[in-house]
Amino acid sequence: MSRCGVLRGATRMTLLARRDFLKCLLAAAAAPHLGAMAVRGRAKGANAMSDHPTHTSSADQRTPVVFVGHGSPMNAIEDNVWSRRFRDLARELSRPKAILAISAHWYVTGTFTTSNERPETIHDFGGFPDELYRVQYPAPGDPALARRASALLGDRGASLRDDWGLDHGTWSVLVHMRPAADVPVVQLSIDGRLPAAEHLAIGRALAPLRDEGVLILGSGNVVHNLRHAFAAHGRGETAPPEWARAFDARVATALERHDGDALVRLLETEEGRMAAPTPDHYLPLLYVAGASSPADRVHFPIEGFDWGSLSMRAAVLGP
């Protein structure tokens, strides 16, 4: 039996050796998004609606846009500094009518929205304690919102899918932010073929949802280099390296300046290639930035690093 298999019998991360936990985390990341890439059913063509009558609100009630660094799936079941900050973040947000989530873990070929009325809770990882696999997040879906988002994306060819649900990039955060699972949730996929600037443009196209009571939530990590995290842990290093701190700070500055083009360019810098060796965890930030407005106030309710170089920064952009 592998060490990761043995770890599944544990009940808490505190019972795991930190080295073994990171090995499992790296094993899960070694072939990223295979579950998401697998076609578990046929994609359905978007049946676009010109409006979304179940989600309307006046302009002065415009919802913010939020990016959250979700970190380890274990944050879903641990009472730790990050899970407590997720709960604190929720207290500063009004209840939305629905949530459109862009998760790093639905990184596929194509742009899709989940059209399920009852999306399943997807445990898209391996080698974690059994307790984590028992977590269910039974939030309802919102087919009308799925159609509305697809319609807003127009000729970008967004389609409806009912063979995906809520992956851990979404539910590991929402179990703390909306523990009652009483707000409808729709996921939007990330098309891995698109250039970074196009993800920013998709965010801009989705901005009208903010005037309809929809919270646009991006979930990833500004700095997400698990290979470095493992190596640093093996050397006993806990402080974030300079490149990680510098990249995280430059991203924060670009957000404060509402400089979407800078956020795109940062991916191509030397620090960006270290911070995001694969772009999946960074790209949800571009959707959030794209849907923001220059008039939005920007603040960072969560800052800091986990596992040495994993940025846990969260950003709220709103009135």
Image (tube, rainbow, N blue to C red):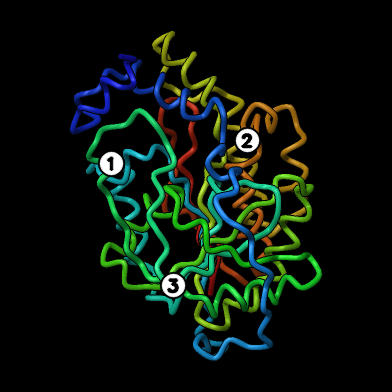
Q: Secondary structure at mark 2?
A: helix
Q: Nearer the viewer, residue 134 or 64?
A: 134
Q: Is residue 132 left or right of 234 when viewed as pictured?
A: left
Residue closest to the far top: 235
Residue nearest the viewer, comparing 26 with 213: 26
Residue 128 pos. (x, y %): 32, 31
Name the N-terminal-most of marks 1 and 3: 3
Q: CA distance from mark 2 to mark 1?
A: 31 Å
When asked about the image quadrant of residue 4, the answer is top left
Residue 56: give x, y in percent of width and height.
Answer: 53, 89
Q: Nearer the viewer, mark 2 or mark 1?
A: 1
The answer to whether residue 288 is left or right of residue 156 is left
Residue designated by label 3: 117
Question: Badge 2: how crowded within 10 Å, few (<14), some, or many (20+)?
Answer: many
Query: Does 2 appear above or below 70?
Result: above
* Farthest residue, direction front: 41
Above or below, 74 relative to 172: above
The residue located at (76%, 45%) in the rendering is 193
The disc labelled 2 sits on which kind of residue? Phe
* Residue 168 relative to residue 102: left or right: left
- Closest to the camera, between mark 1 and mark 3, is 3
Crowdedness near tag 3: few (<14), some (14–19) or many (≥20) residues, C-alpha within 10 Å:
some
Left/right placement of residue 227 relative to residue 237 reads right
Q: Name the secondary structure under disc 1.
A: helix
Q: Which residue is mark 2?
A: 247
Label 1: which residue?
A: 132
Q: Residue at x 60, y 48 (%)?
A: 39
Q: How many marks?
A: 3
- Tell me the quarter of the image containing the N terminus: top left
> Which of the 4 quarters of the picture holds residue 206?
bottom right
